Image (spheres, coloured by chain):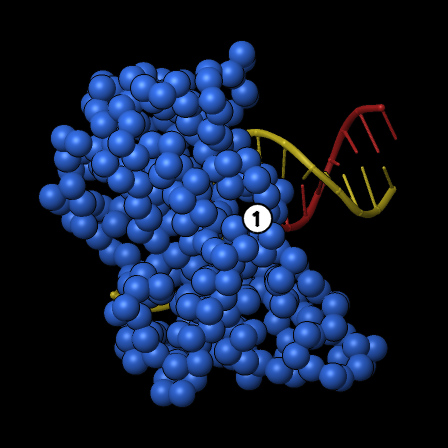
Chain colours: A blue, B yellow, C red
DNA sequence: CATCGTACCTGGCAGC
DNA sequence: TGCTGCCAGGTACGAT
């Protein structure tokens, strides 16, 4: 999955093809993804004009002219494929198809089906169960060291696990949590509640910085992730620690033969990568 | 509430 | 060349 930078990249790729266009045909090629589609899914979208394509956390939000909002999540393996016309044959995991009055076709493809689509009403969007409990947007004006520290207060779990919790801060995933903790020089095993003051300032700045740089690079292309345009992102070449077990720490000068370089541990069932010398 | 383990689903890859 | 087991960007849910 795509984390915040990949979802942002997908939204930016979709916007020019969807905004201002009318959805002339919507196909739903199976009954459910991670959850069932809402009743009347295709009918409620067909004939509607798209006003905007936005992002909240890792959700894509497509606002339509009647106040309906299409909520889409890419899960781990979801992709939006844009083609100038309907493909000759459907792919094995092409689940939803949106065709615009320009003839452009957007196909939602998701092999693992951890993604989902739902419909909401614009006026009550923030109260939707999928969005209601989300923490602040890390690229928003309201996000800061003190805000982050406040949301970590009282949390006795690791800072790694806390940052993966979308109610603490929205949009981070397994890659960018490792990267942000490295940049902030904080150990992933540190108790979340101990990240206060200057440490929280460092972490908030690291989160914002790494997400901004990843978006500028078009996201990270690992395995099946691609931009909506089909292009690869390039941020994976800039990872400091993620998937770099045993590699030299880019911030340290110590001998890899002695330190073992970047270390991989498992927290809450997921890989974490970090430099034990540099991160405390 | 906070926290943890588990489940969901498919595909790619290393190792035999 | 198979086969097997492990791993993968996420989230929800139940148990404690």
Q: Chain for mark 1?
A: A
Q: Does A31 appear above or below A255?
A: above
Q: Nearer the viewer, residue A15 or A252?
A: A15
Percent coordinates x, y for residue A198 in the rendering: 40, 87
Percent coordinates x, y for residue A54 in the rendering: 30, 45
Other residues around mark 1 within 10 Å, as few (<14) / some (14–19) / many (≥20)? many
Q: Residue at x 42, y 54 (%)?
A: A4
Q: Residue at x 22, y 19 (%)?
A: A47
> Looking at the image, which residue sits at the far left?
A123
Q: Nearer the viewer, residue A79 or A279?
A: A79
* Count of marks, rendered view: 1
Q: Position of A223 compared to A146: left or right? A: right
Q: To which quarter of the image does residue A118 belong?
A: top left
Percent coordinates x, y for residue B1 in the rendering: 25, 65
Q: Is residue A35 visible?
A: no
Q: Residue at x 14, y 30 (%)?
A: A66
Query: Which residue matches tag 1?
Result: A233
Q: Does A172 appear above or below A24?
A: below
Asked which secondary structure carries label 1, the reply is loop
Q: Position of A246 compared to A200: left or right? A: right
> Looking at the image, which residue sits at the far bottom?
A198
């Amino acid at each position: 999955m795509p984390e915040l930078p990949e979802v942002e990249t997908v939204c930016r790729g979709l916007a020019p093809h969807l905004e201002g266009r009318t959805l002339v045909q919507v196909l739903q090629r199976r009954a459910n993804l991670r959850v069932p589609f809402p009743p009347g899914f295709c009918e409620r979208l067909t004939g509607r004009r798209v006003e905007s394509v936005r992002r909240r956390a890792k959700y894509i939000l497509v606002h339509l002219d009647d106040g309906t909002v299409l909520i889409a999540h890419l899960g781990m393996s979801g992709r939006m494929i844009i083609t100038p016309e309907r493909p000759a044959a459907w792919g094995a995991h092409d689940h939803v198809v949106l065709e615009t009055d320009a003839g452009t076709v957007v196909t939602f493809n998701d092999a693992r089906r951890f993604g989902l689509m739902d419909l909401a009403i614009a006026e009550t969007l923030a109260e939707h169960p999928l969005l209601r409990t989300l923490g602040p947007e890390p690229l928003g004006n309201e996000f800061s060291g003190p805000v982050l520290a406040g949301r970590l207060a009282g949390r006795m779990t690791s800072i790694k696990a806390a940052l993966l919790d979308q109610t603490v801060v929205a949009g981070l995933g397994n890659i960018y949590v490792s990267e942000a903790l490295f940049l902030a020089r904080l150990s992933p095993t540190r108790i979340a509640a101990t990240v206060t003051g200057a440490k929280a300032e460092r972490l908030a700045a690291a989160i914002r910085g790494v997400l901004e740089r990843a978006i500028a690079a078009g996201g990270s292309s690992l395995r099946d992730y691609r931009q909506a345009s089909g292009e690869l992102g390039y941020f994976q070449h800039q990872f400091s620690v993620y998937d770099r077990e045993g590699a030299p720490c880019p911030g340290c000068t110590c001998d890899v033969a002695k330190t073992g370089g970047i270390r991989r541990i498992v927290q809450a069932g997921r890989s974490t990568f970090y430099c034990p010398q540099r991160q405390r």
